[in-house]
Image (cartoon, helix red, strand yellow):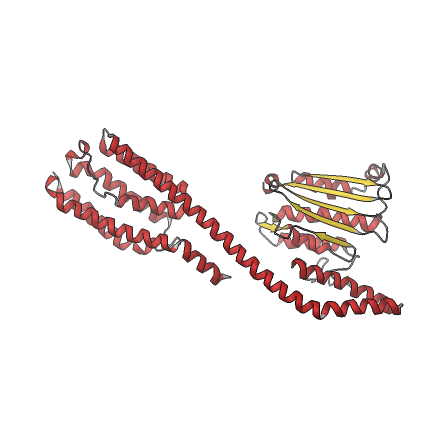
Amino acid sequence: MAGRERVVRMSVELPLWRALAGYRVLTMVYAVLLFVFQQDKFERPAVAVGFLAVMVVWTLATLPKVSNAARCTRGFLIADLTVALTGILLTPLADAQAQTQDGPTLPSIWTAGSVLAFAIKGGWRWAGFASSLVAVANIIERGEPSRDTFHNVLLVWVASIAIGYVVEVARASERTLARALEIEAATRERERLARDIHDSVLQVLAMVQRRGTALGGEAAELGRMAGEQEVALRSLVAGGLLPTPRSVADGAPPQAGAGPADDTVPGARTALAGRLAEDQDPDAPYDVRTLLAAFVTSRVTLSEPGAPVLLPARAAAEVAAAAGAALDNVRRHAGPDAQAWILVEDWPDEVIVTVRDDGLGIPEGRLAQAEGEGRMGVALSIRGRLRDLGGTAELVSVPGQGTEVELRIPRGKAEK
């Protein structure tokens, strides 16, 4: 991936920096030749010679600075723009008629190189800042600027901002392409593993499940465990989302038979999901699907969009914890044979996570009674978490037809 990303960056940014380096050298030579052929009109040629000498030395000495974005630091950009502005403001001192005639300044079009460096480095905002300073310097240098002066100033301003915007778009395209190449490589690898696993491991697990169920007794329990592991493995192959089943509860190893598909440790799964997000930068984007996949078992199914569903890591952990609390209620109250489904929807302005089951449902008034008895699972573990994220948690339950918990997380509020 690093090599692929390097190739992409070379195709987008490196030609721009090389073009800028060439532009600076060529315009430096052009400014010097202008002075050589028009030196007789300068009242103080020593001022012009002094500035041009500084400009030549500065241009050649700083060529490595404009070779890539890493070397082109903010300090260099400020110093480079200062040289250009100084040359513009020194022009009337070297040529007294410069304010009455529309002639070139001492640095001439070399000044545009400084503005272009701002545009390539920081985008259109930086370009607008630098070109505005150049515009002010040109107006001051002219004293009473003519229409040609305003025309030239406007041209530099518009051109630099346009180039800066194009650079930003190119960088965004570069990141998108790099991400697409990464997804393509991961998809190909997952497909290869899926073929190999389907031809071997999944078939063996399915056979163990059938034979164990037919034999009964301890073999039936072995068959049940094989079936659960088959479900977990299929989920892993399909989405690549299930975390490694290392210790699942406060660092303690799982009990015998407990694994990614064990129904007996929903609280431990919630803790695992929380730790997976807490290991990240709290404000860094995190894929909610990765955390919710930890809840997949033979009785819990995850349906997701097939692309990363990103929220800040802290918000992702809270959503996963709320979903875990809802699944814990399913395990405790929905009945031994209840099935549960997790649906993840990714919308531009919000993320919706729905937990639904086909269990016994919640009798009318039971939630209020539970809160009165001090059991605050729905009030705190679910609604309280979503309220802290600026979202909502809606619970709909029909006795005998199951329960549905809908978690809505607005993107803007979650990011804050």
In the image, taking residue 52 as reference, residue 384 lies left or right, namely right
Count the marks: 0
Q: Is residue 256 among what the camera can see?
A: no
Give the residue at the far top of this rendering: 144
Image quadrant occupied by the C terminus:
top right
Where residue 184 appears, as percent x and y from the top left, is: 56, 59
Left or right: where does residue 30 sit relative to residue 353? left
- Where is residue 145 shown, x and y percent of the image? 24, 30
Question: Measured from the top left, where is residue 135 in percent x and y?
Answer: 30, 36
Q: In the image, residue 335 lies at what x, y percent?
A: 86, 50
At x 77% / y 40%, what residue is drawn? 395
In the image shown, does 198 or 353 lie closer to the viewer? Answer: 198
Q: What residue appears at the point 28 percent right and 34 percent down from the top-left corner?
A: 151
Nearer to us in this view, 307 or 229? 307
**Can residue 182 be seen here?**
yes
Between 273 and 99, the one nearer to me in the picture:
99
Compared with 273, 163 (above or below) is: above
Q: Report the side of 169 relative to 409 (left or right).
A: left
> Is 168 above or below relative to 236?
above
Q: Residue at x 25, y 33 (%)?
A: 148
